[in-house]
Image (cartoon, helix red, strand yellow):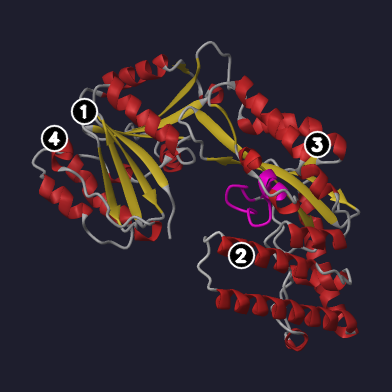
């Protein structure tokens, strides 16, 4: 597995100065003018090959719609050809060509992503873009190679097109690092643009989120932690942690941006409590959005009217639209998320929350004897049941709810179970609940086991206390 990267390759039929001038004209028609890095609303790096210019932007990795929109605009308005190179997990690359001719090529193995009949490219679309003395047969042969990493295939194909191989699969971060470490390399150049008529950087989503949500959450006891990412945290009774943040989402329209409000509950005894992670990449396993919380805690059958509350969208370059959507998302959060997590005030209610809202089931993965004989057991959320002396039936309720949902799917013809298979599933799930409760009761009744559990949990708490102090939060 590898990383994702996105570049735009623009055929340059002029000299460097003329290309830059033409690019600036495209940006001017969009309402942007060159500026300093500190003022920039959007940033680009150019990598100049002999007949191509590789363009990367700080907005391309997380927003493919912006990449497509930019590439089409560059090709059409600069009267040239341009194609996107999107590398996916080092397994395959998608090439999208725009301009006088359009085409799509899949290089590498995309079968793991459901791509079986992959397009291999049309000769008439690419042949006129090749470097001097290079042939379509050679390019097609390279694109058809089976390499461990698709980046290797793209590297080999770059000279056939006349592109610097180092630029083919680079991204904004790569160009930024190359620019910093290669002061004399004129082939890599940064360009910055701001909205015409503005004095500086526009309000970012991150800053707007902190402003809008901060003003509402801080009076309720939340505090923005010292982190690269905007987590608002509230500690309750020195044991329970409420968390609210956001993550960006893929928009449905090219002229929009989208985000999702996430929230959740944790205990200070949680082993994986790390708020240095980007909400896009980490913590998604235990942070839920408003829609999920409402769906899992509501008895309403028809949820269609709530489907829009998991993703909030606004016009990309309209601050008023962004602030309005943030305010709307805050209103939804006040109505749905805050009451749900606000009810979690101790370890017992935290356990009930996890059974009802989270997909975690706090299950024991070993019995009492295995735990007692393990000299270095890992801490686990299931041990919260021991500390809280939890006697509730949260696991049973969650299991029955899941089985009832499967039963509904079967009756609607949307589940492949036979009746016999479903009955076996029910029997197995209910037996699992019985066995989990037996293990739980054994842990709770054995003083030596309980002492070992308490020691593990206190170690987690001590670690989290120090970590949260570094965030500016006292537990």
Disc assigned to residue 100: 1
Q: CA distance from mark 3 to mark 4?
A: 58 Å
Pointers 1 and 2 in contact (CB under 8 A)?
Answer: no
Camera-side mark, 1 or 2 = 2
Residue drawn at 34 percent across, 56 percent down? 110
Q: Secondary structure at mark 3?
A: helix
Q: N-terminal of the two: label 1 or label 2?
A: 1
Q: What is the magenta range? A: 277-294
Q: From mark 1 to mark 2, how far is it between C-alphas?
A: 52 Å
Q: Tell me the residue at 32%/46% (across/down).
A: 94
Instruction: Look at 24% across and 35% down and name the residue there.
Output: 102
**What is the number of the mark on residue 128?**
4
Q: Is label 2 in contact with label 4 (beta carbons under 8 Å)?
A: no
Q: Mark 1 or mark 3: which comes first in sequence?
A: 1
Look at mark 2 in the image and give the residue it sits on.
Answer: 406
Residue 286 shows in this picture:
yes
Disc 3 designates what residue? 217
């Amino acid at each position: 597995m590898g990383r994702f990267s996105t570049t735009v390759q623009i055929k340059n039929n002029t000299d460097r100065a003329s290309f830059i001038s033409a690019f600036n004209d495209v940006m001017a028609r969009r309402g942007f003018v060159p500026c300093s890095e500190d003022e920039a609303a959007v940033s680009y790096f150019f990598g100049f090959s002999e007949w191509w210019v590789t363009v990367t932007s700080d907005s391309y990795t997380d927003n493919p719609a912006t990449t497509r929109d930019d590439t089409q605009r560059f090709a059409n308005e600069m009267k040239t050809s341009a194609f996107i190179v999107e590398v996916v997990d080092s397994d395959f690359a998608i090439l999208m060509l725009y301009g006088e001719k359009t085409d799509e090529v899949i290089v590498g193995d995309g079968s793991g992503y459901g791509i079986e009949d992959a397009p291999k490219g049309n000769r008439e679309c690419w042949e006129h873009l090749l470097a001097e003395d290079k042939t379509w047969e050679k390019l097609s042969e390279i694109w058809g190679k089976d390499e461990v990493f698709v980046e290797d295939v793209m590297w080999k194909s770059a000279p056939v097109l006349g592109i610097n191989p180092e630029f083919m699969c680079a991204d904004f971060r790569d160009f930024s690092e190359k620019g910093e470490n290669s002061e004399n390399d004129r082939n890599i150049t940064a360009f910055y643009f701001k909205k015409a008529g503005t004095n500086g950087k526009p309000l970012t989503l991150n800053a707007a989120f902190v402003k809008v949500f901060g003003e509402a959450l801080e009076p309720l006891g939340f505090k923005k932690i010292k982190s690269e990412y905007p987590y608002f945290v509230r500690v309750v009774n020195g044991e329970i942690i409420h968390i609210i943040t956001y993550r960006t989402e893929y928009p449905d329209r090219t002229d929009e941006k989208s985000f999702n409000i996430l929230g959740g509950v944790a205990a200070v005894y949680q082993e994986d409590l790390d708020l240095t992670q980007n909400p896009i990449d980490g913590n998604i396993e235990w942070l839920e959005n408003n829609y999920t919380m409402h769906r899992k805690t509501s008895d309403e059958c028809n949820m269609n009217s709530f489907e829009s509350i998991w993703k909030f969208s606004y016009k990309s370059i309209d601050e008023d639209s962004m602030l309005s959507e943030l305010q709307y998302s805050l209103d939804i959060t006040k109505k749905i998320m805050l009451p749900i997590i606000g009810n979690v005030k101790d370890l017992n209610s935290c356990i009930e929350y996890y059974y009802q809202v989270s997909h975690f089931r706090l299950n024991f993965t070993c019995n009492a004897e295995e735990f007692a004989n393990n000299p270095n057991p890992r801490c686990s959320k299931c041990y919260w049941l021991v500390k809280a002396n939890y006697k509730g039936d949260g696991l049973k309720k969650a299991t029955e709810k899941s089985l009832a949902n499967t039963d509904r799917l079967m009756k609607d013809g949307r589940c492949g179970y036979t009746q016999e298979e479903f009955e076996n599933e029910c029997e197995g799930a209910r037996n699992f609940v019985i066995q989990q409760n037996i293990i739980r009761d054994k842990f709770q009744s054995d003083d030596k086991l309980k002492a070992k559990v308490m020691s593990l949990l206190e170690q987690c708490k001590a670690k989290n206390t120090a970590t949260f102090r570094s965030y500016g939060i006292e537990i």
